[in-house]
Every structure is written in C-alpha cells, then in structure tokens.
Amino acid sequence: MELITTVFIAKAIIVGVVFAITLGVAAYSTYFERKIAAFMQDRIGPDRAGPFGILQPLADAVKMFMKEDFIPANSNKWLFIAGPCLSMLTALMTSAVVPFGDSVTIGGATFDLQGIDVNIGILWVFGIVSLGVYGIMIGGWASNNKFALLGAIRAASQNISYELAMGMAIITILMITGSLSTKEIVEVQQNGHWNIFYQPLGFIIFIICAFAECNRTPFDLPECETELIGGYHTEYSSMKLGFYLFAEYINMFISGAVMATLYFGGYDYPGVDFVTQQFGSNVASFVGVGALIGKSLGFVFVFMWVRWTIPRFRYDQLMNLGWTGLIPLAMYNVVVTGFGILVGKPFMVSIAGLVLLIAALFVYDQLLVKKKIA
Amino acid sequence: MKLSNKTKVLEQGEMTLAERMYLPAIVGGMATTLKHFFSKPVTIRYPEQTRYLGPVYRGQHILKRDEAGAERCTACGLCAVACPAEAISMVAEERKAGEETLYREEKYAKVYEINMLRCIFCGLCEEACPKEAIFLQHDKMVPVFHQRDEVIWGKDKLVEKMDHRYLRDGWK
C-alpha cells in the first residue's frame, strides 16, 4: 500500500510537471512565432507588453477570455463545444508516453521520468494523433458552415493520407529497435547511436508528415484563408478559437518531442558519462530532461522557420506528394533497412540506399522525362 | 511585333529533377530567411524614436518674430485667402505709439487662430505670406489633442518664443 501511494504521488508530480511544461511552452510558442516571423521579415515584433513583449501571451489570453463567446444559432451546440475540447484533449494526451528523462533515484526509490511506459508506446502516439482529427472534424461539422465543413474534410483526408507514410517511416525504427516502447527506442539510441544516422530518409519522410499532421505551413490547407476564410474554425470565437490555436502549438511541441525521441536519441546528449561521474546519475537525468526539451524546442523553431519561408501547397499537390511521393519512398526505406539488418551493417546500407535512390531518380529523369526546350 | 531585344521569352517546360524534389529549393529559401533572421530590423519605434524628415517637412505652424523680437505678421489676410481648408482666421488692429518693439508693421494681428482639425498642412500660407511671418516647422509636429477646446490654436501657441527660436536648414 505504501509503495503504491509513493508511486502514485510520483506519477502525479511527473504528469503535473509535464502538463505545466507543455502548456507553458505552447503559450510562449505563440510569442516566439510572432517574434521569429518578425525577425525573418526584418521587423521587431511584439514589444509593448513587458520588457521585449514577454507578457504578450498573458495579454493574448486576457483578450481571448474577454471576447464574446459566440455560438451560431443553427449549429449543433454540444458538438460545437466538444470540438475544441477534443482537440485540446488529444493534443495533451500524446505527451504521456514521451520519456522525458532517465530514471531518478530519490530516497532509495527509483522513478522513471515518464508519464507511462506502456509497451505499445509509439502506437499510443499514433492512436491519439489519429483521434485528433475528430476535434477538427466535429468542430467543422457542428459549425453548420460550408467553409468550416470543407476545412474539416480537408483536414481529415490530409491527416489520413499522411498517417500512412508516417507509419511506414516508423516501421523502420521498430525494425531496428525491436520494440514499440518509446523508452526502449530511446535506450537503444544511447551514447550517440541516434537513429537519424541510420534513418536519414525515414526522418525526412517523418518530418514532412509531421508538418502535415500538425496542419502547419506548407500543409495548412484546413485553415487556408484565401480559399476557406478561416477553415474549420471560421465560426469559432473567444477561448474556443483559442483552444484550437493552442492545440496546434501543443501538437508542434509534442511532435518535436516525438521526433527527438524517435530520431535524435531522446534524452541522450554528448557527455552523459562525464556528468554522471562528476555529479551523480540524478543530475545527469535532469540534464537529459533539458536536452530533450531543448531538442523539442529546436524542432518548434524549425516548424516556425519553415512556416515563414514556404508558401502553401495546392490541394492536389499535397495529395500527390503524400500518395505518390512519400509512401513509395517509405516502402523503399523499409526494404533498405531490412537489407541492412540482414547484412548487419545498418549505417553503411542506409547511406548506400540513399545514394542508390538519388542515382536511380537521376537516371529515370535523364531517360524518361521530357526536357525543357533549350 | 518585336520592339526591342530586351524581351525574355519564358519557357515553362517540364521541371527538372531538382525542382520536382522540392527539397533543394526549400533549403535555399530557408537559408534566405535565416539570413534575414540575423539582419538588423528596419523598424523605427515611432513615439520613442523619430527620424529626420528633411528640411522641407511641413509640421507645426509658427508666427516668426524679427531679430529685434517684433512680430512680423501684418494681418494682411493673404494666408487666410490662400488656405484651401479655411483654417486660418484673424482680427487686425492698428499699432499704437510705443508698441514699435512688439510689432514690426503699423498693422498687426490682434487675434490669429488656426483650426488644427481643418489644417491640411499644405504649406500654402507659408507660400502666400509677403512678410515671411508664418512657417511650418520642419522638425516639430502638432501634438495629439483629446479635447475640442484644444483644437483651435491662438497666438499664445503660435508666436515664436525668443529664447527658443526656429531655424530651418539653410537659414542664417
């Protein structure tokens, strides 16, 4: 009984801290999104609320809460309210299986710095991310607005299309690790054996799919202003709209954390052994937490960087890229990885596979594609 | 018909392999944005920072005095006639004996008012003035007003202060 209580309290603390970090990062992502956009356009960005504008998220939250909370007369009221709630819920649930750090020993008891270490870890992430489309779909449907519905349909078809390529990209990780548990995936990558070196092609496919799954530019067609006014959240106002936008930022941070877990060694960082010897394993674990969050924030920056660089894809281009581009590439990657495991030299084979792919594309291009008129 | 050899005919054939892969172009674009990320912003934080607007900027009006400190305006009314917005009005008065140090000419403006809501800062009053009495300052703007009674500016606000004289670039 004693043990159960301790474990429960420890888990409650971890869950609370992860929750707080996620929400805090998401809140400040809105600020940094605007700052980064401003810097990339040679501007300054928000700088009025507090020094350098760091109180801007608070001001935005106050604004969001003070606005009129409008529900359209002919909408389905309960589904209209359920939409943003579902979006927020699914966005937050994903972080449960991300291993934020190695175990910590306090008073003889050892705690894993992870919400739950389920043995289907990465499948859990996929399941929840797939559920995330319900938030958008329900919101778009309940609005009783054709633009909102079109946005929701786009979101649904886009998410389903890109989940396939994403799943195919992850199969190679599972082949290397031999486990679905996120904890084990990270442990296999310790001491610099990061999956990015063995799976460069898989990572490129995964990050492109992550952009599509988060509905971020260049794949933000569900909220394409030029065609759909605001997309699925056209009818939303006040904090309901705030929840939709907030869920997007949470998704960005979590997908950054998942990418760090799958491809960049999770909480691994150069010099773990040195820190462990000098300061003990607890300190090393907490530095690892910092490393993981740092990697996730790096990915968040990449997300924003891409957003302020690339224009939006057209819808047929999006579907073309997903179905005829990424899925065959992911299949090829599975074959190459399987061959690498069979031969026993995964690193050499993955590089050779990449070179072979580019060479094959080049030959195909030379032989079969019509040239520009010189 | 071909008018010059400057025209460039754009051939849009099939995209090359690199173009169809998108990624090289995306990396190039991201390099451009990153370069701008570290370059200096061009923003001027206006109320705190101002920039020099040039020697001919038309800002707040001023009624000049001459070197001895006498008002130059003789209330001829040409500025009011020239004003397209009809913002200027004045009441003339004859100079009394002993007031020579205050007013340069024998007739002067007892009341001189500019309605700042009407004024369009075109500078035609400055062009019209034969006595070089009214100017639009190049370095000072009319401050924001919040009340109706702040809108009409009289001589108390318009006449030049001798301890803070207005000098335009190029004047002696």
Image (cartoon, rainbow, N blue to C red):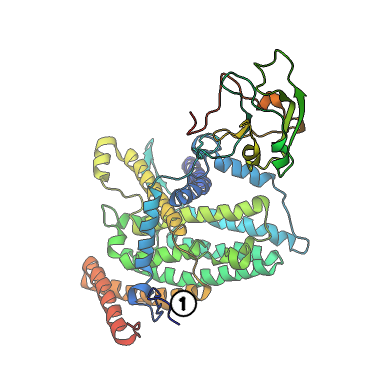
Residue B109, quarter of picture: top right
In this rendering, position of residue A265 left or right of residue B130: left
Q: Where is residue B123 in the image (x, y as percent from the top left)?
A: 62, 41
Quarter holding residue B128? top right
Q: Name the residue under label 1.
A: A320
Indicate the position of residue A161 as horizontal and vertical percent values. Answer: 49, 73
Q: The residue under label 1 is which amino acid type?
A: Asn
Q: Mark 1 lies on which chain?
A: A
Q: In this view, does A319 lie above or below A309?
A: below
Q: Quadrant of residue A324?
A: bottom left
Quarter the C terminus of chain A occupies: bottom left
Q: Can residue A332 be seen in this view?
A: yes
Q: How many marks?
A: 1
Residue A131 percent coordinates (x, y): 56, 64
Q: Can residue A100 be seen in this view?
A: no
**Which of these two is toward me, A194 or B38?**
B38
Q: From what the image shows, is residue B92 above or below residue A180?
A: above
Q: In this view, does A145 lie above or below B40?
A: below
Left/right placement of residue A274 relative to residue B153 reads: left
Q: Where is residue B45 in the image (x, y as percent from the top left)?
A: 51, 39
Is the residue marked by circle 1 packed among few (<14), some (14-19), or many (20+) residues within 10 Å? few
Nearer the observer, B33 or A224: B33
Foreground pick, A239 / A111: A239
Q: Which of A173 and A140 is in front in this view?
A: A140
Left or right side of B122 for A334: left
